[in-house]
């Protein structure tokens, strides 16, 4: 509530300067999903924006500024929501912001191509105390669908400014800003046609309102609270019951509510009836029998069989891009940037103590190198994800995969981030952002490290041929299949025992296909990449330095280091899997990066960095059963430092990060022991 | 657009439920006989646009949804436009994967489990049937 007080003081300050001169306006950007909200936001603010989280929430908050003559618009992007009833965290955030922070204006961004459903949110926004401007986006998509919309007719009906726009082509944005400016300066009249509850429920609403109007806490509008009670809104109900109303009065309110349990449907119907009245004159529809492009494309894209084929094709293309463009770039960066830097640092620090040059070259530059070399692959994945999302394809991919993800209590939407994990688990964890519900997002993040990433594959590719000869390919596929089976099992179990709760109902809008916007995609990629560099990057760097220190201290030699001591302490555990302490240390160093396991073995077995001699040494000391056990552990082992850091960043919780690490540690060790014994017995 | 507001039709069903005092009786009318044409959404097959409007059954009407879906679910559905009286058209229903419907100018994918909780009434004919 302290925040609310601050905001209203700010409001008072602004009100004084509203008429002329320099003005700062706080404008909230509201809208349903798939209305081009991020395009509008990016167009207005460019790179002049700040991405963070809503206070205390894991949902992204974007704010930015736009300057128009003497007006500075401070734009706050609200989460995309279909309504303002507390069905999801996003809806609570959106309405709390409008009610408690009192922005000067709200832009209700609506998709002209599905006006009827989109104006539902406007029907919810108008009764709130903040003035609303309706931005009618995607006029081109509506025209393509054969809809003829007259914005001025809609404006007359709604009584609030309506601005037609095509944000992707930068049309109408200037007019929107001008309208905001003029409305704030009182140059445009504002007489909203606020939807009223249907007459047959007016009485009930008034009855409830009368019972509680005097004790509705600031800054909630009391009639709005009464309506939300009638709609059965959990949050408002809890607030009135626990904090506001004396018990005996709550009893009476509760009685009335129980007697009118179905009213929420009538309230929603009433809003839609209002919407239909609003658009009746403004929209002319095409004649019947017209088949749209979206319908034609969806015959294939959402077909149970062809849809899967198309998805497989697209994913194959992503893989191809990663390996033909991403991987070589990664190598180039590693050799010419990171390697050169490390060499230069060693040369420059030639006279300094060995620990210092080690710290700089191996610890800091090595750690930073890990971060930088991730970038090409991350950028490719982010770009493809943003492209598919912007085109409207993402919802179709989720649709065809839903059957399979259902088993784990997830939606089809979780499939895409998990798929990204095959390249690298970091974008997989970050990609989980596209999932709406907190529970499903968390489960997806927990499962992501179980997708075998490219780095783990390289370890398999190196070790399997040494022990299994011609069967190596079979072993590799077997390991991947096993890992995925473990993933599915863990998914089912975690869903059942840990993250209990209903799978959220599968209701998903399939947006119309439209041409992607390069600027939106570019800014999205830029933000995701810089967010990774800033947040996960610094954590990766710190952890790399720590692990480096453990492997170098106290004598600057890994064989006598603290890490080796840990490895030796773990030897009895390794014994259960047929692994000696050196192999355990190799596992431990794979925490920095999975492919490190091979390099560490090289050092410990005295074969140098040349892997040529290592296979002979390994073949001598490991039984095939132990090698298989090692590979199983390697596949399931705790994720690398980059993934752990990203999990922390995305879950905002050390608890869940610890859970993920602990779960994988137990899984991998149990898997290793079981594999060793079964394999030795066979 | 003219036949879009079928609020009156729905009130009949809600009242029915109240008269009987039970939600399950949504399937029955006041005399306790089955109401013809009320089925759950998952039973509605899609009809290709080319056959419209000579074929009936492509367009359905959301009747008072069964409330066993839980309030949250119904509230989400209502926000998306699944309110009593709304007209929708089934675009895809293979009998297994999720269903795709078109209502209020929006294509919505709906899990089968969810579809079984929505009670609909078949409509015969109609002009605005094949629009996406």
Image (tube, rainbow, N blue to C red):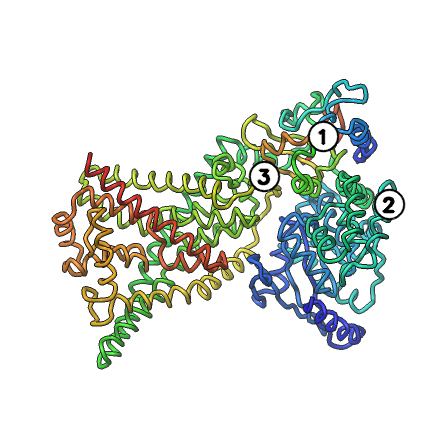
* Disc 1 packing (10 Å; few <14; some 14–19; many ≥20): many
Q: Position of residue A477 (x, y in %)?
A: 30, 39
Residue A404 is marked as none
Asked if residue A97 can be seen in this view, the reply is yes
Residue drawn at point x = 57 percent, y = 57 percent = A59
Residue A202 is marked as 2
Q: Earlier in the sequence, mark 3 or mark 2?
A: 2
Residue drawn at point x = 26 percent, y = 44 percent = A673
Residue drawn at point x = 65 percent, y = 47 percent = A87
| Residue, disc 3 | A506
Instruction: Please state, as top left, top right, bottom left or bottom right, where the N terminus of chain A lies in the image.
Output: bottom right
| SS label for mark 2 | helix
Asked if residue A284 can be seen in this view, the reply is no
Say yes or no: labels 3 and 2 on the same chain.
yes
Chain letter, disc 3 residue = A
| Residue, disc 1 | B129
Chain letter, disc 1 residue = B
- Depth check: give the residue in front, A146 or B113: B113
Which residue, as the protein is rendered here, is positioned at the far front?
A248
Above or below, A44 relative to A665: below
Instruction: Please state, as top left, top right, bottom left or bottom right, where the C terminus of chain A lies in the image.
Output: top left
Nearer the viewer's eye, disc 3 or disc 2?
2
Nearer the viewer's eye, disc 2 or disc 1?
2
- Depth check: give the residue in front, B46 or B73: B73
Chain letter, disc 2 residue = A
Nearer the viewer's eye, disc 1 or disc 3?
3
Say yes or no: labels 2 and 1 on the same chain.
no
- With A480 as the anchor, is A124 left or right in this view? right
């Amino acid at each position: 509530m302290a925040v609310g007080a601050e905001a209203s003081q700010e409001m008072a300050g602004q009100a004084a300067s509203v008429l002329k001169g320099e003005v700062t306006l706080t404008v909230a950007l509201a809208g349903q999903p798939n209305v081009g909200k991020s395009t509008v936001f990016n167009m207005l603010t460019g790179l002049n924006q700040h991405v963070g989280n809503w206070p205390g929430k894991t949902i992204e908050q974007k704010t930015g500024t736009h300057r128009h003559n003497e007006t500075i618009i401070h734009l706050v992007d609200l989460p995309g929501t279909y309504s303002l009833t507390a069905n999801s965290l996003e809806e609570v955030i959106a309405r709390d912001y409008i009610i408690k922070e009192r922005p000067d204006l709200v832009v209700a961004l609506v998709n002209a191509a599905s006006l009827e459903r989109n104006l539902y949110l406007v029907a919810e926004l108008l009764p709130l105390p903040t003035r609303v401007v309706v931005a009618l986006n995607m006029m081109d998509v509506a025209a393509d669908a054969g809809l003829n919309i007259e914005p001025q007719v809609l404006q007359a009906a709604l009584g609030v400014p309506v601005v037609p726009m095509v944000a992707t082509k930068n049309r109408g944005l200037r007019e929107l800003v001008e309208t905001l400016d003029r409305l704030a300066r009182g140059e445009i009249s504002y007489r909203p046609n606020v939807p009223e509850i249907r007459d047959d429920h007016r009485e009930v609403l008034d009855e409830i309102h009368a019972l509680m109007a005097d004790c509705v806490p600031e800054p909630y509008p009391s009639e709005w609270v009464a309506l939300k009670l009638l709609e059965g809104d959990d949050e408002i109900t809890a607030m009135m019951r626990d904090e506001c109303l004396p018990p005996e009065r709550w009893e009476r309110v509760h009685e009335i509510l129980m007697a009118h349990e179905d009213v929420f449907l009538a309230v929603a119907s009433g809003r839609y009836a209002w919407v239909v009245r609003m658009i009746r004159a403004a929209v002319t529809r095409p004649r019947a029998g017209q088949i749209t492009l979206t319908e034609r494309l969806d015959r294939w894209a959402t077909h149970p069989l062809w849809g899967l084929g198309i998805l497989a094709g697209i994913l194959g293309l992503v893989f191809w891009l990663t390996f033909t463009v991403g991987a070589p770039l990664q190598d180039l960066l590693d050799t010419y940037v990171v390697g050169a830097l490390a060499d230069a640092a060693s040369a420059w620090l030639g006279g300094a103590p060995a620990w210092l040059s080690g710290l700089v070259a191996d610890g800091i530059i090595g750690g930073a190198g890990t971060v930088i070399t991730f970038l090409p692959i991350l950028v490719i994945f982010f770009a493809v994800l943003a492209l598919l999302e912007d085109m409207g394809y993402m919802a179709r991919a989720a649709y065809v995969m839903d059957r399979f993800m259902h088993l784990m209590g997830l939606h089809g939407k979780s499939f895409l981030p998990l798929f990204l994990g095959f390249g690298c688990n970091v974008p997989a964890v970050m990609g989980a952002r596209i999932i709406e519900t907190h529970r499903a997002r968390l489960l997806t993040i927990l499962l992501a490290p179980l997708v075998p990433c490219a780095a783990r594959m390289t370890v398999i590719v190196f070790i399997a041929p040494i022990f299994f000869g011609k069967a190596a390919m079979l072993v590799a596929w077997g390991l991947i299949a096993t890992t995925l089976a473990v993933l599915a099992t863990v998914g089912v179990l975690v869903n059942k025992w840990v993250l209990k709760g209903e799978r959220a109902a599968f209701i998903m809008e399939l947006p119309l296909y439209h041409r992607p916007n390069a600027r939106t995609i570019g800014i999205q990629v830029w933000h995701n990449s810089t967010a990774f560099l800033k947040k996960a990057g610094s954590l990766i760097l710190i952890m790399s330095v720590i692990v480096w220190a453990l492997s170098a201290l106290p004598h600057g030699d890994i064989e006598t280091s603290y890490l080796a001591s840990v490895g030796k302490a773990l030897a009895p555990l390794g014994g259960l899997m047929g692994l000696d302490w050196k192999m355990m240390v190799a596992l431990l160093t794979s925490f920095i990066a999975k492919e490190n396991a091979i390099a560490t073995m090289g050092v410990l077995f005295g074969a140098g960095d040349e892997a040529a001699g290592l296979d002979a040494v390994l073949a001598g000391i490991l039984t095939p059963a132990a090698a298989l056990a090692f590979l199983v552990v390697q596949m399931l082992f705790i994720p690398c430092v980059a993934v752990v850091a990203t999990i922390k960043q995305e879950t905002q919780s050390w608890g869940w990060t610890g859970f993920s690490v602990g779960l994988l540690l137990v899984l991998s060790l149990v898997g290793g022991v079981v594999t060793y014994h079964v394999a030795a017995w066979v | 657009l003219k036949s879009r507001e079928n609020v009156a039709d729905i009130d009949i069903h809600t009242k029915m439920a109240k008269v009987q005092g039970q939600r399950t009786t949504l399937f029955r009318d006041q005399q306790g006989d089955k109401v013809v044409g009320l089925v759950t959404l998952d039973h509605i097959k899609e009809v290709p646009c080319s056959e419209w409007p000579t074929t009936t059954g492509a367009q359905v009407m959301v009747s008072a949804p069964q409330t066993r879906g839980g309030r949250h679910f119904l509230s989400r559905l209502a926000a998306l436009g699944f309110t009593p009286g709304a007209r929708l058209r089934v675009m895809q229903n293979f009998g297994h994967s999720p269903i795709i419907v078109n209502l209020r100018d929006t294509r919505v994918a709906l899990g089968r489990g969810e579809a079984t909780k929505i009670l609909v009434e078949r409509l015969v004919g109609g002009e605005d049937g094949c629009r996406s």
